[in-house]
Amino acid sequence: MASKAISSAASAISSTSLASSLAKSALPHTAIPQPFVPRDSFPVSQQIVRSYFLGHHHSTLERMRRTVSTVSLIIEVRDARIPLTSWNPLLESTLSATNSPDRSRIIVYTKRDLIPDDKATRAQVNLLSRFHGTSNHASAVVFLGAGQDPKPVLDAVRRAARDQPSPSFAGTRALVVGMPNAGKSTLLNRLRVRGMGRHVAKAARTGAQPGVTRKMGTPVRIVDGVEDDGDGAVYVVDTPGVFVPYVSDPISMLKLALVGCVKDGLVPGTVVADYLLYVLNRRDPGLYAKYCGPTNDVEEFLAGVARRTGKLLKGGVLGMDRAADWIVQEWRGGNLGRFCLDEVSEDSLAEAVRLAREPVLSMNQAVKKEKSERKARGEAKWAAMQGG
């Protein structure tokens, strides 16, 4: 009897377990949330536009070559968000063609307010300053934000003028140069207001898009002379931004497009927004949390932006291109995270120097070189496969 009772109980337990299992399997499946994993690389197309070298860039370089011998100071402007990518080797070679030991050079990194003021960034700023002081022969390096007093730049200009071995009674002539939309004209206007010590009108036109300055200007006084004859005065000539003939690395072209060094639309806005999404994800997806959750899908990202900002077309269709343009402008304004796009290190600086020393190729020469290199790599790969 006891044996039968035990057997009956076991059967009941088994039946209960089976019923429980069936009940669990009948419940709707709930997926376990997976942690978000950002893309580890950006799959940029090799077909992306790789140049913004316009006719007036070429003519500006020719005028620089003819006038640089009469200039005793170069003020080179770069974007602090891309301190290495905004380094133009073409300007470097042009301005050093008639190298003079008497010519000073000041490097100004604009938009300092659009990168962080944390320990890591300050270390990069110090590294750049040491590098330029020892390897780049700059008499001064200044990082300048939008709301910052330009006095450090003006002080460096005055020192350069004072330290000339053979001061001229006609004053000191300077060129302000750099990539398109790096902030040259804005800097000139700020220096003029600060240096003249009174209210003065703008000396150079400025704008959000590159290409506002189309030709070299006339000398503009930014520092009054000590004497009435002009001794000690400083005159600066504004110049159009000059692009490189060909950008070999497509990621560099995307960086230049993102910060606004090339005209908007040259690189499709959705591609620039996709690169921005990639950069944001590598730092903190929470930076765009009010538009959508973490995603690697640019369409999902832009759809969220369009809904949130009302970028809609006729019939309520989401305006993806408008959303792309809007979100890029948000980042440029510092409203979507402030960070440097370039990695600044001893190694990256050494690589920048190496690239700057290579001959500057035209677009046709660069394209032919890349095709030749791809062909050589393909042949080497095929030979390895045959040999293996």
Image: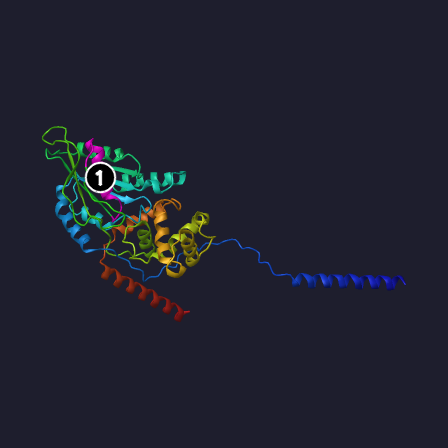
Residue at left offset 34%, top offset 64%? 377
Q: Is residue 200 left or right of residue 21?
A: left
Percent across and percent down for residue 253 are: 31, 54
Residue at left offset 60%, top offset 61%? 29
108 drawn magenta = no
Give amino acid for label 1.
Answer: Asn
Q: Which of 24/93 is in front? A: 24
Q: Which residues are magenta?
A: 179-200
Q: Secondary structure at mark 1?
A: helix
Residue at left offset 28%, top offset 52%? 355
Kindly give the residue lying farthest to the front in the view shown.
Answer: 315
Quarter of the figure that contains the N terminus: bottom right
Query: In the picture, residue 145 is in which quadrant?
Result: top left
Kindly give the residue lying farthest to the bottom in the view shown.
Answer: 386
What residue is disc 1 on?
Answer: 189
Decide if residue 16 is in sight here.
Answer: yes
Q: Is residue 91 left or right of residue 301?
A: left
Q: Which of 106/29 is in front? A: 29
Query: In the picture, residue 304 is in which quadrant?
Result: bottom left
Decide if residue 137 is in sight here.
Answer: no
